[in-house]
Amino acid sequence: MNAPMPGLAERVFAQFLALEQQARAADTLDRLAYSLVNDAQPLFGYRHAALLIAGKVRALTGVSVVEPNAPFVAFVEHACAQVAAQDGLAEARVVSPDGLAAQEREDWRTLSAPQVFWLPLKDRRKAVFGGLWMAREQPWSEAEQALLRQLGEAYAHAWLALQPRKPWRLRWPRKRLALLGLGALLVLLLPVRQSVLAPAEVVPLGGRLVAAPLDGVVAEFLVKPNQPVKAGDLLVRFDATALKAQADVAERALGVAEAELKASSQRAFSDAESSARIDLLAARVEQKRAERDYALDLLARTDVRAERDGIAVFADAERWTGKPVRTGEQLLKLADPTQAELRVELPVGDAIALEPGAEVALFLDSDPLHRYRATLQRAAYEAQPTPAGKLAYRLDAGFEETPPRIGLRGTAKLFGQRAPLAVYLLRRPLAALRQSVGF
């Protein structure tokens, strides 16, 4: 006999059991955290979920590395802290923004979905050690809430199975502990030079930007990345089909306007009406001539040529070929291969006090054993988002010797002023404490 087709309830129950199995099959906390915020999304249809452990976001849906300074991360942490202070987070329930501060309500409206369900994670003593913030557009039904409560117990059990135990206490004599503490304090007071690591890239110095001269489609790139070019060499060719037709139409319209002007001029000696139209037709001829000249000028811009000698700096020609571009959009740069500088993206969380002239050391990914020396020249006052989605300060440094090839990437070590070893080691914890306490 053929087995009966499973219904909706059977499929939902099978997915629910699969979620419990995936959570208990995780062998590390990082894999479990990724599973908690991603695996249940097909079943419950939430837009995003955030895993909070001890009040801090540990994992986010669709994000491999959580940025502590991201706006959404800060919003979830502040919102959970306010809800915990008012109503508590001990029970699984739908969360309302009514009791939050004005800033958190505004962030909720712009950063999160309207319907949020809080799923707490409890230890063996029923104390909450974390939870899941799940947001979506549709309200949470009673059946879904019941499934989530049961799933929360499985998630908490899986997390506690992987949570490492607390370290055992050293049972030394008090005198020895005091001497050890005094020695550690003296070591922490030793002055050391502050330093920080940040990703860096070798970029052109004083390169000439080649931008799109018109709105159109790139037909072909006639140069390759890092190819030497001479002044006047053809770099990029735009699709000129429409512009050629436009120039031809403008040329014919000019011919018609000139013919009408010539005919009216000949009839002006005997026809008063034709004599009165001469000025209008002459103005129309000038208009059509300007339209023709403009069309020819656009047609001439379809061939983009190099204005100086150098090398063509861009990533990939396939990215542009056949793609529409806007006027002024950057296509490539022309740079002198012997003139380069170092561009550093310093994350906000790692920022230290740096002055122009600070020492910078570059270690390339392709040659990590060779050290390139540079000097800090400029530092941005405002952090900007990087292509990776993180906030970072842009720093520019000049090389003290022959620069490496343009386009190479690596890690830059920036040296700041001297400070006690305690400040060097505890700089980030102290910054986090200052942000939390507010002093």
Image: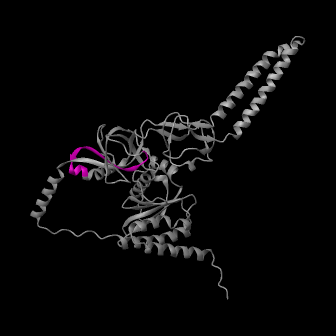
Q: Residue at x 29, y 40 (%)?
A: 358
Percent x, y for residue 227? 50, 44
**x, y percent for residue 142:** 55, 68
**In-image side of 400 versus 64 (left or right):** left
Answer with left or right where residue 405 lies relative to residue 10.
left
Residue located 63% across and 76% down the image? 7
- In the image, 78 versus 19, the foreground residue is 19
Q: Is residue 171 visible?
A: yes
Q: Residue furthest right?
A: 270
Q: Residue furthest left?
A: 175
Q: Name the image quarter holding residue 5.
A: bottom right
Quarter of the image for residue 84 reads: bottom left
Q: If the image is split into quadrants, where does the C terminus sit?
A: top left
Q: Is residue 416 magenta?
A: yes
Main SS type for the magenta part? strand
Query: Going 42% across and 57% down the picture, which residue do you hit?
Result: 66
Q: Position of residue 330 (x, y in %)?
A: 53, 40
Q: Is residue 417 magenta?
A: yes
Residue 26 vertical placement versus 332 (above, below):
below
Residue at horizontal 49 percent and vertical 56 percent from the top:
96
Q: Viewer-proximal residue, 179 or 44?
A: 179
Q: As displayed, is residue 385 above or below residue 230?
A: below
* Quadrant in the picture for the N terminus: bottom right
Q: Which residues are magenta?
A: 406-424
Question: Is 327 displayed left or right of 176 in the figure?
Answer: right
Which residue appears farthest toward the top when viewing the image? 269
How many marks the image carries: the answer is: 0
